[in-house]
Amino acid sequence: MWVDKHKPHFLEELAVHKKKVEEVKIWFEERLHAAMDDHNNALLVAGPSGVGKTATLYAIASHLGATIWEWNTPTPTVWSEHLYNANSGLQYMSKLDEFEGFVERVRKYGLTSPTLKGSQASVILLVDDLPVVNGRVAYGKLQKCLKLLVQLVRIPTAIVITNYDKDDSADFSTRCWEELLVSLHNAGACKVNFNPVTINSIKKTLTNICRKEQREVSADTIELIAKSSGGDIRHAITSLQYLCLNPHRRPILPLKERPDNSICLDDAFSLPFGKDETLSIFHALGKFLHNKRENDLATASDRDAFILKEKFMRFPLKMDAPEVVLCQAHGQARTLSDFLHENVLDFLNEEAIDDAWLVASYLSDAEFLLSSLNGLLTRDFGAENIVQSAAASVAARGVLFGNAHPVPSRWHAIRRPKLWEVEQSLRRNKCQMLSLRGDLCNSLTLSNQIVMATEYRPALKWLGCRASESFQADDMVEDDSGSTCFHEKKLDMSDDEIEDW
């Protein structure tokens, strides 16, 4: 891959801002040439993915003549291997437990790698691949482990943490990483934030790679790749390599020949080399349910092409159009509607009864559109797709518009729709009734499912219960009188239950 082949080895080759590189270099110079216990030896390197965090650390270490010892996540254990080793006495250890053991060894004994024995060069510890945590307990364990590393490590240590999109701050994992950064910074670690790489720096790097690879790529194409990468230079280099595999796969017009003389970055995901903007269905649900909006009324009035009544006015959304989010999530309308119906009440103000009524009406409209497709066999897939898209749009926009008084953003688990369990039980009961019809006499085979469910099945259940009770009563007569009295009491309870039914 060109990303590895053209990895920068010198400071001059880095696309990161010079002041940021100088800041990190000065920090390492002070720690490498000072006594071990004179300074805090942990550096937090934070920033989006693909902005040159790790490449900068390696280039600086090479410039200072230091050796980087990087913590590498152990190879995952597959389930079959775990079962094979289960009887040998080897216990399974999670990646978090292995990382905790590594931190404890470094804290007590320092780095003991065989590759470092006899080396006179200074050593820098790099932690780039942190274990993935899920839940408060695992997150607290990782936080405690890293705080010990920050406070007690005796060699210069760089901890690389990738930031996520600010718009997703309500997500649990995102908030955990933000809290982790604050906690480690308060524990004494120095923090350096890396910004997305500028378009000019990406263009310069891509041009140099084209020259080394002897590929002819127009300046307009390089600029288009740089702008669509979103500041991710690793993605830009990969996109360039992908484009060079088949440069005529899609014609690219020069910038001056484009209709608006500009590039629509909102449609970058549709480009053959654009950054992947795919979202998960839960990511899209979070955007719709949290309903984040701007607070500037002037911005809202500027976007309105006509005057609206006060009850119809809403602040602008802090996200793309709902249809764009739905397209990126690749979610089905039925799934989206069921999840919104199950969880939307948790995101409404308890006193906003009118909001709940309005949201319910929109979800009912979406359900009406989807119900028109139930059991319908048609070859007009275009019309079916339109109905599906319309239902998803009505459900999403209905939740966004109807929730005029959303609760403050917070972490909240998304529940699985209970409707799915009801439908699963319904299908199971139908299958049981169909099998029961085949076992009954011919006079019942023509009965529909409604008659089976409301008349025959309860009656057969009652008769079967009475038959089993009579059989048990005959057995109980042979026992002592105390047991018989207990059985009579049980029969009375069963009769009450039947009457209630």
Image (cartoon, rainbow, N blue to C red):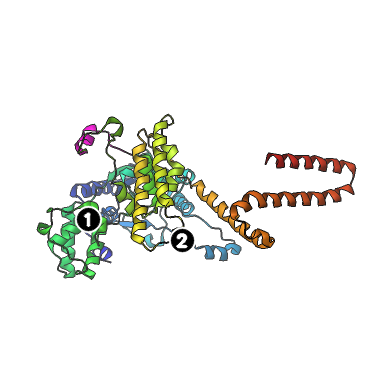
Q: Is residue 463 left or right of residue 179?
A: right
**Residue 460: image x %, image y %?**
70, 52
Question: With 415 as the anchor, is 202 left or right in this view?
Answer: left
The single residue placed furthest to the left in the displayed view is: 256
Q: Nearer the viewer, mark 2 or mark 1?
A: 1
Q: CA distance from mark 2 to mark 1?
A: 34 Å
Q: Nearer the viewer, residue 416 or 391?
A: 391
For residue 257, above or below residue 311: below
For the N terminus, the image quarter is bottom left
Label 2 environment density (alpha carbons within 10 Å; few <14, some 14–19, many ≥20): few
Q: Amino acid at mark 2?
A: Pro
| Residue furthest top as drawn | 351
Q: Which mark identifies residue 228?
A: 1
Q: Who's the residue at 22% across and 66% down the image?
A: 243
Of 117 and 380, nearer the camera is 380
Name the side, left or right, on which 260 lies relative to 279.
left
Q: Amino acid at mark 1?
A: Ser
Q: Disc 2 on helix, strand or loop? A: loop
The region drawn magenta spans 292-303
Query: Of helix, strand and loop, which one carries label 1?
Result: helix
Check if mark 2's residue and mark 1's residue have beta carbons within 8 Å: no
Report x, y in % for residue 408.
38, 34
Q: Which residue is mark 2?
A: 76
**Quadrant placement of the C terminus:** top right
Question: Tag 1 or tag 2, which sits nearer the N-term?
Answer: 2
Query: Residue 154: x, y in percent?
Result: 38, 47
Q: Is residue 277 visible?
A: yes
